[in-house]
Amino acid sequence: MLTGRDSLNRLIGKRRRYLPNRESLLSAPIQSSLNLCNDTKNGKIIPDDETEKGNFKAARLVTCPICGSDVPGDNHMINSHLDACLARGTKRKLTQRTLLQLNFSAQTKDQNHSNETKLSTTNVFSEGPVESLEQNSICGLANYVAVEDYNSNHWRSTENTTSHQRINCDEKTPLSSPHINGPEHDVNVTVDGMSEATLQTFIVGRRYSDETEIKIGAHISLSRDPNNVKDPNAIKVFSADSGCCKVLGYLPKELSEYLSPLMEKYSLSFEGFVISAPKHSFDVVQIKITYHKIESDNENDDDIEVSTCLWKRALHVARSAKGYPSSMIKYQCNFNLLIQEVRGNSRHLFKADEIDFLESFSMLSEDSQRLFVRLYMRKGPWFRLSNISYPEVSNSREAVRELTDNGYICSSEDTNELHDAIKDICNLLTVSELREISCVLPKNCHRGSRKQKVIASLLCFYEDSICPFLPKMILDRTGLCIRVSSKAEHLIWRAERLFFLNGEQDLSAFLLVDLGIVKYPTYNCIIAEQIFSGLCDLLAYEEAIELAQIMDQSLDENNIELVLRCIMIAESRMSSSSCKAVQSITSELANTFHSCFSESWVYSKVVLLGISFLEREQRFNDAINLLRRLLSCFTCDSRRGYWTLRLSIDLEHMGCPNESLSVAEGGLLDSWVRAGSRVALQRRVLRLGKPPRRWKIPSFSESIKRKITEIHVQGRPLNCEIGMKSWFYGEDGEKCGVEQLALQYYAGEGGGWHGVHTESGIWLTIFGLLMWDILFSDVPDVFRGRFQNAPLDLATDSFYIVRKNLIESQLQKIYDGMAEEILITSWESHVGTVCRGVNWDRHSLSELRAAVTCIGGPCLAHLCRHLAQDYGSWSSGMPDLLIWRFHDEYRGEAKLVEVKGPRDRLSEQQRAWLLLLMDCGFKVEVCKVSAQPVST
């Protein structure tokens, strides 16, 4: 895997089917001092179709078993392509079709955390009226409802639990979105002094009903269901007309979150009646409910304030839900919500006709909306209409007609569409159908069983005009074919990008939350500044993303000419003016993360990947020029350490040791060169700077040459192959790796240590739990959506600077020995909630408590401070093992061990961590595992 490839894949995310700027990007003249392409024609490149055709005729192609594409048959290209496919495969999202067919009724949360989760939700309102509720509870996921204030750009969201949080009922914040038309509720009501109030909502969960038929006007009553495994706040709806109190369903969990504490703690009882009868037995049922307040002499002002806030939130949830038809399916509702929020928050990033196009989606019939979302979430790009059948879409053909009329899909009836997509439509045919077509063609047409071989043969006949009727023969078998239109896909892709602010998340994030698989943390979204100031900035960023995708696809296809051209385009667009603009933002530490959303940032990733490619091709001179270009454009960037190190190494490859030494020495004067890169440069200076090049010994010489304790362990090897992972027989005779063998040694003759093989995992988990409240504290602009697991500035210098007082206060508590208490509280409050670095499944609470106790407050505070100050540089490369042992019930000691196999050596990042940990007071050592000598 080329350096930077994985990072570029995460930036690109799901590959787009159509790149609107591809032709203009590749055909535009390049103003670059580099000339990487030796075979270009007047600065232009051969079109893809000609290139693919030439490659097909000139080289032996093989079919990739993972992605199904054809690649050149030499071993090097096959292996490189498989590596790339497998790397991407590990990051694939869950199949959208499978998720949708689950009907949102399946798995609950991991049962391993059910007890802790129940504790953190059922005891929400038992800790005191103000302590547990005054702070805002708002910015979760599944039950998120946007609350927009267009004057202050301050908006919030609600989570499915309000554990250890307080509700912020700032009267200046409106309680509904202006884009939602809901029932007229009296929002300014207070519970104090009122005997009753009403709201309109729905009965959901009808599959759990004891009564299939419900009539308009039927009386209902509500009752808490605290033992519900899916939602501890659940509220059952009973039929009040029947003497046996049959269950009709449940209230929506978004509403139950606020009504359940009103019923339990504030003694409110609810009753109501049905206002519309469902068409089908499992459809949601519209109801109107009224609460009756039971008077109490023990209420104080705090109770009244909190209960009023809860009621206001319940009214807001009811109003927001009213904005969507009761028959709207969840994924359809999620899609509409995404479009609505983007239209409201990023309207300035769309043209007038684009806004009209997005707004027209809500005017489509429900069948059309559902079918479009289904097609958009599938791989495609083309689909046979005869194969499209969804139970929730009653009339697919009518929906296709409406979508076509409104420009959301295109069909094979368009001859232009058919000519450009003949290969994609061929893939819709079965092997038997392809054989039928090949049988009527000349005898030299391929008639094998490999689908891609048959398609390639048919396309050759079509391109050579031997079979001009091929499109008709294909459509005779497929019938009408459809695909999402280029305009619709482009605008929805943009909406997703603005909504999630990354390429790794898509609509499946909604589904994972609705299914209870993922729960996001609680935080406030306080937006003071837009990421994209205008449409021009966004279009430039989108164009850069397109170039990154072209670069990635070109590497997959081994299209060297196109790879080199992408490098040149990216380098030329990192102009001095754009880089200065980026640096003017990054120099303001509070907004450093904004640079990640600039075109220059994306182009720098393309260039970095290009440097790795050129180094692999041993074109070191070109790589050196690009590295110098990066260093000159980005003067305030945490990647400068890696760039400087590569520049020094490549100069040495070119036979320029003096210049390589000078670059390394200059890099050590750069404050942005940190962690492993700094250690690597220091070691290069010591190696290259020997007399007569340098006579003076650097001041860091003694520190970098410090002796790290080494322990040698011998074991019986299972394999001795170079390039393969080393395996040994463990003490129990079972197969194990070097880390497990080292743990067995430390547990036995090594001193009775307990421990875990964790690398960075346990440390990032401990950091996340100890600093949870700081990670999700109120800081402007760092939280912009409901699906974030960390603030946007976590990996930047601004994270520590902006929160310095909060962080230092927390570090003092840790230093004073309160880490275990903080850890337990954080675990019980947030168990199962996603947070960057925190792994709830890999480490138990008992392991974390033991580790924290044995490490001690001073060492732990030093470690957390380094992570807070530079999370990006120090979040990887930590030692393999954390081991500990107790001296008594409250005292112990801990040690960190880096394990190395017979042919391994320390990386520079690992060496930097070991030296840093020694400075922090940790006990560290390197355990070297080797094979036992063979006795003769």
Image: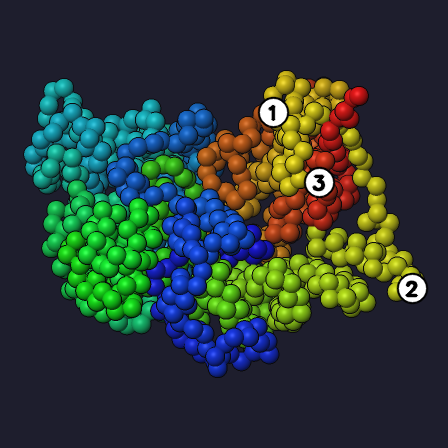
Q: Nearer the viewer, residue 26 or 219?
A: 26
Disc 1 crowd, CA 10 A, few/some/many (<14, 14-19, 20+): some
Q: Name the disc covering residue 904, or none.
A: 3
Q: Is residue 442 left or right of residue 158?
A: left
Q: Are marks 1 and 3 in contact (CB under 8 Å)?
A: no
Q: What is the quadrant of residue 713 in the picture? A: top right
- Disc 2 on helix, strand or loop? loop
User: Foreground: 232 or 757?
Assistant: 757
Q: Earlier in the sequence, mark 1 or mark 3?
A: 1
For the residues marked 3 and 2, what is the alpha-carbon distance in whole angstroms? Answer: 32 Å
* N-term-proximal mark, 3 vs 2: 2
Q: Amino acid at mark 2?
A: Pro
**Could you tell me residue 510's position as x and y percent?**
34, 46
In the picture of the structure, the residue carrying the numbered disc 1 is 735
Q: Nearer the viewer, mark 1 or mark 2?
A: 1
Instruction: Name the image colouring.
Output: rainbow
Q: Residues within 10 Å of mark 2 (few under 14, many from 20)?
A: few
User: Where 742 falls versus 416 (above or below)?
Assistant: above
The disc, 1 or 2, on the residue closer to the chain's N-terminal end is 2
Residue 213 showing in the rendered view = yes
The image shows residue 25 at horizontal and vertical percentages of 43, 73
Which residue lies under the disc numbered 2? 692
In the rendered structure, which amino acid carries the disc numbered 3?
Asp
Q: CA distance from mark 1 to mark 2?
A: 52 Å
Amino acid bearing label 1: Lys
**Residue at the image position 78 percent from the left and 26 percent from the top:** 933
